[in-house]
Image: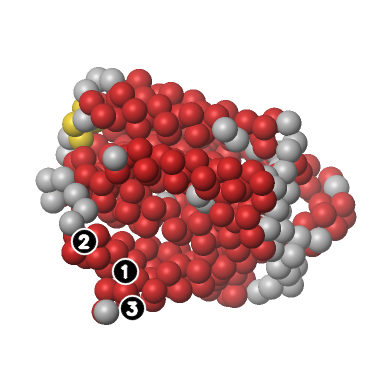
Amino acid sequence: MMPWLLSALGLVILLLAGDALVKGAVNLSLRVGIPALIVSLTVVAFGTSAPELLISVNAILDDKPGLALGNVVGSNTANILLVLGIPAILAVLHTSSCRCSKSYLQMLAASVLFILLAFRGTFDWISGLILLAALALMLADAFRDTMAHRREAAITALSEADGIEDVEGADPNMPWWQIITFLVLGLVGLPLGADILVDNASILAQRYGVSEAVIGLTLVAVGTSLPELATTVMAALRKQADVALGNVIGSNMFNLLGIIGVAALVGEIPVDPQFLNFDLWVMLGTSLLIIPFVFFKIDITRVWGIALTSAYVVYVSVILI
């Protein structure tokens, strides 16, 4: 009974922390003149990827490198299919108003780079440095966009303020201490909740005889994607589609470039042929599924949400067979 109760506790912590992180990120963007999308691509995305980083590094130190790779690849697939699918079932994601085409292309480029390096047979320190260099370039580009936006906002301050204040949950008068408190609670609560949930869910899985490989690609991957799911659900309910989509795109980039980049410096990660033959291509294929929402200004409706979620169920079924 205790693993079930602790799993539920972890889920509650995730939901509360996700709400806090969204509030803090949106109001941070309002106070410093940065678009909510850019904040979600950096602060929110990095914070919600903390569980993947912790688990991947621990897996390397525990001499279980396959778990680290399965965690990242499985999490990226879950991020697209579940983290966008489930919130869309609850509330339509109005992604037609989002301007994230460049960030999305960067995510696709990161995916292709990751797959090319995987065909070297192992992620070693050379691969790690290449991935971290690509992450640095992405962050530098986001910084340039931020500076350009702040200069533009200085010219059209009134219209910018009017636009963002219409976002539900945004408070232009929120004090700095409260914004920082929300961010800290979110960034601390998300990995804490995920750790509690994954640990106890793993106990339950082992109790029912599920293999470690399956746990890595499914249970651990889904568990470490729950922070992204919690944050995206709250963003969807608050009508903040830019935070929701930006969170997924930024998290996927950080998973590929940052997490495996750091983990590869800790120890080598051999690539199982199963990843080269199937899982990596599924990850890339699911990333391509959101092209209509990024380039053709289509909202992620409930029908799309059901389709994405169903596709993940099929993927997991194939792994389990």
The residues bearing labels 2 and 3 have C-alpha atoms spaced at a distance of 17 Å
Residue found 50% across the figure and 41% down from its top: 311
Q: Secondary structure at mark 3?
A: helix
Q: CA distance from mark 1 to mark 2?
A: 19 Å
Question: Callout 2 environment at 10 Å: few (<14), some (14 to 19), or many (20+)?
Answer: few
Q: Are marks 1 and 2 in contact (CB under 8 Å)?
A: no
The reply to whether residue 289 is visible in this rendering is yes
Seen from the viewer's position, the closer of residues 294 and 298 is 298
What kind of colouring is applied to the model shown?
A: secondary structure
- 180 to the left or right of 174: left
Residue 202 coordinates in the image, percent (x, y): 25, 61
Mark 2 / mark 3, whichever is N-terminal: 3
Residue 150 lies, with reference to residue 276, above or below; the image says: below
Q: Give the amino acid at mark 2.
A: Tyr
Q: Which residue is mark 3?
A: 5
In the displayed image of the protein, which residue is found farthest to the left? 63
Q: Secondary structure at mark 1?
A: helix
For residue 15, above or below residue 50? below
Disc 1 residue type (three-letter): Ile
Mark 2 lies on residue:
208
Look at label 3 and name its amino acid. Leu
Q: Quadrant of the C terminus?
A: top left
Residue 41 coordinates in the image, percent (x, y): 56, 46
Q: Looking at the picture, how far across and down is residue 20, in whole percent?
A: 55, 69
Judging by the rendered image, the residue that carries numbered circle 1 is: 196
